[in-house]
Image (cartoon, rainbow, N blue to C red):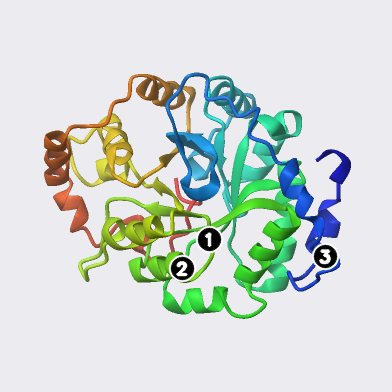
Amino acid sequence: MGQKNISRRKFIKITSATTAGMALETNLLNAFSSDRLDPKGLPTRTLGNTGVKIPLIAVGTGSRYCAMKDEDEALDLLSYALDNGLYYWDTAYIYAYGSVISEERLGKIIKDRRKEIFISTKCSTRDPEEAKKSIEESLTRLQTDHVDILKVHSIEDLDDLKEITKKGGLYDILLSMKEQGVTRFIGFSGHNSDQAMAKAALDYNFDTMLVALNHYSGDGDKFEELAVSAATKKNMGVMVMKVIRPRETVVGLSAHDLIKYALSLKNVNGAVIGMDSMKVLKESIDLLRTFKPLTEERMNELRMSLAPFYKNRNLDWMQTDYHDGLWV
């Protein structure tokens, strides 16, 4: 970060934004630059009020990516993604498969190409002290002194949101990290409670939301209608995930149609797609190069095809033992 190169450890030891004497590092925000983020001709959208233009697809590096056995092939995938315009990478502290840890694998590329990458990671723990240690370890693994988005990992329900936003809790820590320049933006992810995600969007100063697409429980949760709508009112960046999962429930749906459906939705800035092979990556890049939003007629056809998926109460990420990024 040039002349303002303050160490990770110094950042993380600062416990709250009330430490005015050290929060004066506001000039650190000026050290962040999007000048080297190059989509290589791929279509982009502005990520809410961040002002950052992002490709319509972000590289998801959860369990499917970590399950790639050949380390060289996994690293080549990241380099190829970057060389072909996919510079938004999504990871999390807990993303792993076997002995492979997502952040560590990404760090092997990030250390040499940091300025070309828009990196988002997530903090899972709700314990304040553990959270600070987790954030510091994420930076160490990623081999960087800052990230672009630091998210609360998976807001579960209103009680969880209350715990996250209590005084001195994880939300305050993320605000402090943003003020000190450890992260440019803060956000949250979720796939269990439309009410909790909507409240998080409306009542707090998050910059981005990552939401599971195309499902609601039989009890009436509606993520697109409630959670995404709330984020849009605050001009937050909205990314969607679980985009191609309906294939596992409904026969005949293609991954490409499902991605196009997600990217054609109003108020969605982009989709996080799990990458587990060079084939999937190349197909995603090719899709973007020729992407045009689907017609309303085609969108309605897909909505009808998705009806069985909407009504399914047994989706993986609706189970109490589900942890995003840990299931292949």
Residue underneath mark 1: 206
For residue 128, what is the image quadrant? bottom right
Number of numbered markers: 3
The answer to whether residue 179 is left or right of residue 324 is right
| Three-letter code for the amino acid on which mark 2 is drawn | Ala
Asked if disc 1 and disc 2 are in contact, CB closer than 8 Å, the reply is: yes
Q: Residues within 10 Å of mark 3 (few under 14, many from 20)?
A: few
| Three-letter code for the amino acid on which mark 1 is drawn | Phe
Marks 3, 2: nearer the viewer: 2
Inter-mark Cα distance, 1 to 2: 8 Å
Residue 170 horizontal/vertical position (percent): 62, 69
**Compared with residue 307, is residue 24 higher up or lower down, i.e. above or below?**
below
**Compared with residue 295, is residue 155 higher up or lower down, i.e. above or below?**
below
* N-terminal-most mark, 1 or 3: 3
Q: Which mark is residue 99?
A: none
Residue 179 horizontal/vertical position (percent): 71, 59
Tell me which residue sits at (81%, 53%) in the image: 8
| Three-letter code for the amino acid on which mark 3 is drawn | Lys
In the image, 98 versus 175, the foreground residue is: 175
